[in-house]
Amino acid sequence: MNAMTDDVLVELARVKAVPVIRAGSIEHAMRAALWLAEAGMTVLEMTLTTPGVFEGIAELRRMPGLIVGAGTVLSRQDARLAIAAGSQFVVTPCWVEGVIEQALMAKIPALIGTANPSEIWHAHTAGAAAVKVFPAACVGGAAYVKQVRAVFPGVRMMPTGGVTVETAPDYLAAGAFCIGLGSELVSAKALVANDKASVVAKARQLLERLSPSQTMAV
Ligand code: 3PG
């Protein structure tokens, strides 16, 4: 690992929660990002399904103290564009050829989507800085993370998909180094209704639930 990758991983392990922003428009995505930053979230994952997301990532990078990554990276070219826009980490939902190489060249972490032990080991040995255990709630939740961590203690895991404020601490207790939360924090309904208060309240509730004692060393 290099210094830049290390810094991002240390921050992910410190904050423990990565909000995954998936919105129908860049206006909504940016709105969500600013609300979450205001609530105290210092790491954001902007998913590439949002049209205009690269400009959004570049704009967020101008905000001091924020770590901005790209999610739903589905090709080598996606990774290139996300990195050119300033992404400080890249996340895939599954194995995607070329993403790890792009991340290694840019000296940023690649978090690779995995749903079973073979995929976890493949991603890890290929150079993934961490694996995104996805969709975490469907493949067995915190109990699944605990079991795979026992076999792969050296693999950083970021369970994502169906994680809630309620279940977040269970994943950390099971050995996850951080967790990703999407719709739980930023629902499509809240965005459409411009309901900042509910998004900020949910994010603060999450931050309160994540106690420092559950941090895993990177
Ligand atoms: C995603 O890619 O959207 C994430 O996995 C988030 O999933 P969630 O909305 O179930 O948290």
Image: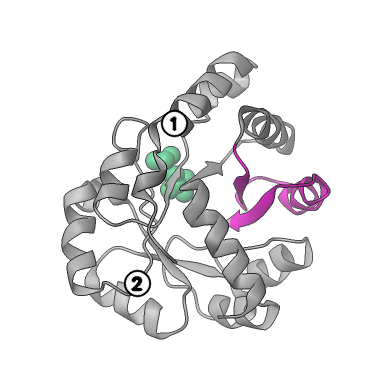
Residue ID at (60%, 23%): 191
Residue 85 lies left or right of residue 69; in this view the side is right
Front residue of 181 and 22: 181
Residue 173 lies left or right of residue 79; in this view the side is left
x and y percent of residue 19 in the render? Answer: 53, 42
x and y percent of residue 206 in the render? Answer: 44, 31
**Image quarter hosting the N terminus:** bottom right
Residue ID at (55%, 23%): 199
Characterize the local packing of mark 2: few (<14), some (14-19) or many (20 or more) Cα atoms within 10 angstroms. Answer: many
Residue 163 found in image quarter: top left
Residue 76 lies left or right of residue 175; in this view the side is right
What residue is pinned by disc 2?
Answer: 155
Front residue of 53 and 90: 90
- Residue 108 visible in image: no
Q: How much space separates mark 1 and mark 2, taking CA atoms?
A: 24 Å
x and y percent of residue 14 in the render? Answer: 50, 51
Residue 170 lies left or right of residue 16; in this view the side is left
Mark 2 vs ligand 1: CB below 8 Å: no
What residue is pinned by disc 1?
Answer: 206
x and y percent of residue 49 in the render? Answer: 60, 49
Disc on the earlier residue, 1 or 2: 2
Q: Are marks 1 and 2 in contact (CB under 8 Å)?
A: no
Q: Label 2 amino acid? A: Val
- Residue 162 visible in image: yes
Q: Which residues are magenta?
A: 41-70
Q: Label 1 amino acid? A: Leu
Where does ligand 1 appear, by image quarter?
A: top left
Callout 1: helix, strand or loop?
helix
Residue ID at (39%, 57%): 177
Callout 2: helix, strand or loop?
loop
